[in-house]
Image (cartoon, coloured by chain):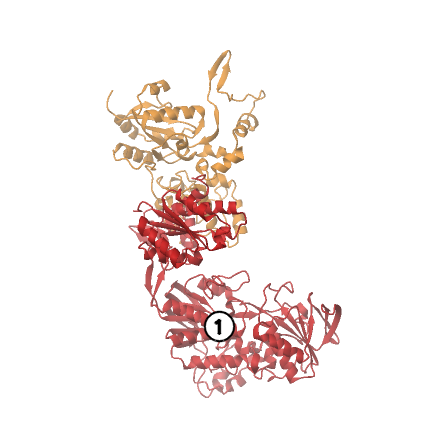
Chain colours: A orange, B red
Amino acid sequence: MNNRPKVAFYWCASCGGCEEAVVDLAEKIIDVVSLVDIVFWPVAMDYKLSDVEALPDNSITVSFINGGIRLSEHEKVVRLLRQKSKLVVAYGACACWGGIPGLANQYSREEILERVYLTTPTTANPEKIMPPQDGYAKLGDVKIEVPTFLPELKPLDEVIDVDYYIPGCPPTPEVTWNAINVLLSGKLPDKGTVIGASNRSLCDECPLNKTKPENVLIKEFKRVVNYSPRADTCLLAQGLPCLGPVTRGGCGALCVKANMPCTGCFGPLENIHDYGGKALSFLASILDYENEEEIKREISKLPDVSGLIYKYTLPKSLLKNLLRSVRK
Amino acid sequence: MIQEPRVGVFICHCGHNIAAKVDVKQVADYAKTLPNVIVSHHYVFMCSTVGQELIREEIKKHNLNRVVVAACSPSMHEPTFRTAIESAGLNKYLLEMANIREHCSWAHSDKEAATEKAKDLVRMAVAKASLLEPLEEEEFPVSPTVLVLGGGVAGMRAAIDLAEWGFNVYLVEKNPTLGGRAALTGWLTNNRRGADVVNNLINKIVDNKNIHVFTNAELVEFSGFPGNFKAKIKVNPRFVNEKCILCGECEIECPIEVSNEYQYGLSRRKAIFFPFKAAYPPIYVIDQRVCIKCGECVKACQYGAINLAEQSLTLDLNVGAIVIATGYDPYHPPKGEYAYGLHNNIITLFQLERLLDEDGPTQGKLIIGGAVPKRIAFILCVGSRNTTPSSKNYCSRMCCTSTLINAIKIKEKYPDIDVYVLYQDINTYGNDETLYEQAGEKLVKFIKFEKPPTVDISPEGIVIDVYETTIQEEISIPVDALVLSVGMVPRRDQNELIATTRASCGEDGFIREVHLKLNPVEAPTHGIFLAGAVTGPKNIIESIRAGSAAASKVATLLSEGKVRTEPFTANVNEERCSGCRICVGLCPYKAISLREINDRMVAYVERALCMGCGTCSAACPSGAMQQYGFKDIQIMAQVVAATGGGIK
């Protein structure tokens, strides 16, 4: 064995995009691989959980974990990785705040299972077979252990201690590379820091910010499904609910450059207690009406407001306790 | 950096005000258990000299660096306790108050629950106090110049008082003459007329070198901050200059005739006209809305006083303060309300005052519809006190008194006329109560109603049907003339003024004072003061008083030569700010703009303009805008303390 830093990658409740994002480092992945020893990466390399269990505690330099915690298996593996790692990094929006799978926290476990296994239009399950919730499945005569579906999705730091956060859905190669450099630099930032991204909101790096009028006021929200934005004017000023002002920068305004409004995947800046609350507050405040009823009317025209403002952060929001009590 | 917090908690009994409903000893004991609390006391009157001394001694003895006083509302005694801790060597903004009187003991009857709530409030205050930072006030020099908007009695009085104190005053009036509505008011008590009061004030203004009068002028732009406002005044052309000797030749030749607003439409005037006998400046004026520039007046004027090519001019003023005294409009009944507009002999109280005034269109003779009426009635509360669907809900204060003055005047001049006063209640408050007795002695007939009377127009004339509640009978009164005692409403053009000055109006539509008892005549924007009926119905005496009150408030602000601003202003973390501009348009005080720092556009707060409303800090999507004294972390600490840590 050599003295190169040991690195682990793991995925929980995620789409796999974060794994792709690591591969998207392209040639730089070779630099990474030459600098470190990868000791665990289920999606790409053939290591078993027992290999990790065999490692001494704190022997992994850094574990990059993506996805939220939704299954008992996720809980088990991330606890193990925490035990074996000096540093744990929440990689991507889902690990940081729950991400899109976190929107399911609006529903109870039973509602979700029923929807997925019984009532979606594309489901054919005449025998009404449901995943077992006792942790075991029968395969013929053999009883095998299977993961159980937890009551809610939790961001990584609600299950284990997290040292750093890399935002994005997924994090861009630049952000990932910046973060890796920070970690390899030896000068580690304060625990809890978001690394690799900007410390300002997206507008700061958005090429359209200079086209925004000083007084941003709109009469109605537009949607990309029925409105083609002009490429030369701030999307917010055009009426699209672009979440750039409330979202951490660092992505280089990729979506805006493709004429799509920011949906907030880089999450909130430091000390923002509730991303969605901030988003709603600024969206409501730029509606050019004096009357609260008119503002309500315009906001309510947006389909799925919670999906808009909490797209990536619902499990971390101030609503989480409320949602817990509603689900009960 | 913030020092390790050492908090002292001081619980006030406020005599029995707090102690009767809150177990203050229990709260004091509880406070000792809270994080960072070094010492906790309770005392009968914390605001007393002894109480303040206790706070000072404890600060020194225990080296306290934060103080929580749990007592009354901060608007009551916060300044007291700030001064106390300052004299003990602490920055005076290291004080946090918990309002356990108005928010607790006064509001609740269950002692046990109130004590628990007081503990909650103290716990929240301690949590915030631990995060307080020392803050510094900022000082700015002031301009010793005052802009007074409105040349009615309130504005003139304010201008005179200020000029006598030595301030430079710009008195700006929208109409071509000073005097306002008081000049048209007619008879007051003691046989004086509104015009007499106005003349008296005008004479004082003419004599005073410190007052610069601009009539036909209006405020078009207003910005800046208390002590240093910038005001742009547009002076509309008068087309007649001071060579005018009021000979009136021009008026004879002028072909344009319109209704005369200075007689409330009872007579007509020309396009070139002189508003009324005592108008100031004593110069004719051309109404540019109706003048066709035919030049007949120029030919008629022997003195070369008329110049039809005169242009408007603008003045840029730097003023320390502004007094808004732009007055009111009379309530205008919709057509058909009490048959108004359906019969020529149905007039308003304002019109009657013109008829009875010797300078009025009939030289004081009561001629309505070509004849002196034999029977005349007044209906009170027209437009006020919810009497009709379009009425306001407030009482207009002056109409009862004014009605009785004029009813008595009619009886004095024409003892044979039957005068009826139909009323809900007679509110001749104060010394004017004697008018009610006098009217009775003069045999004015009072008819009390609960349900507003109905007025019908028949071939014989005007008939009023009313249920008289004292005799409990339906009665029918035929009259020759009917006077509607209309109240006062906000000016029609008030919204323009609000847009320009950022004043705001209350539920009644009049411009709002910050607090009727704690901050009278002050607008929410510091440095803007309000006088007269612009804040709601007032009689002439009350308006003049308000003018004097506003003047003394202005003097308080400007006499020191500098203004100090409260430090609770918004502050931009320029490193964090992304220049997203959300805050800029939201600021109600126009205190935020963008400026370039290191090639980046970031928000900039003009501290002197910021009133600390918190709108920008709440809206800032990135948390870059924080308000001193109310930072997110400070407020969140309170919220977390309130919920027992349930929210994080």
Per the image, the residue denoted by label 1 is B545
Task: Tell me if residue B565 comes above or below residue B361 in the rendering.
Answer: above
User: How many labels sit on residues?
Assistant: 1
> Is residue B280 something that shows in the picture?
no
| Residue that sits furthest to the left in the current view | A2
| Residue drawn at x 37%, y 36% as measured from the top left | A167
Q: Residue drawn 24% across and 24% down?
A: A3
In the image shown, does B637 or B351 lie closer to the viewer? B637
Amino acid type, label 1: Arg
- Compared with A134, B636 (above or below) is below
Left or right side of A115 for B215: left
In the displayed structure, A79 sits above or below B344; it is above
Q: B142 or A203: which is nearer to us?
A: B142
Q: Position of residue B263 (x, y in %)?
A: 57, 78
Chain ID, mark 1: B
B385 vs B630, left or right, is right
Report x, y in % for residue A317.
Answer: 45, 39
Where residue B437 appears, x then y in whole percent?
Answer: 64, 77
Residues B295 and B243: in front is: B243
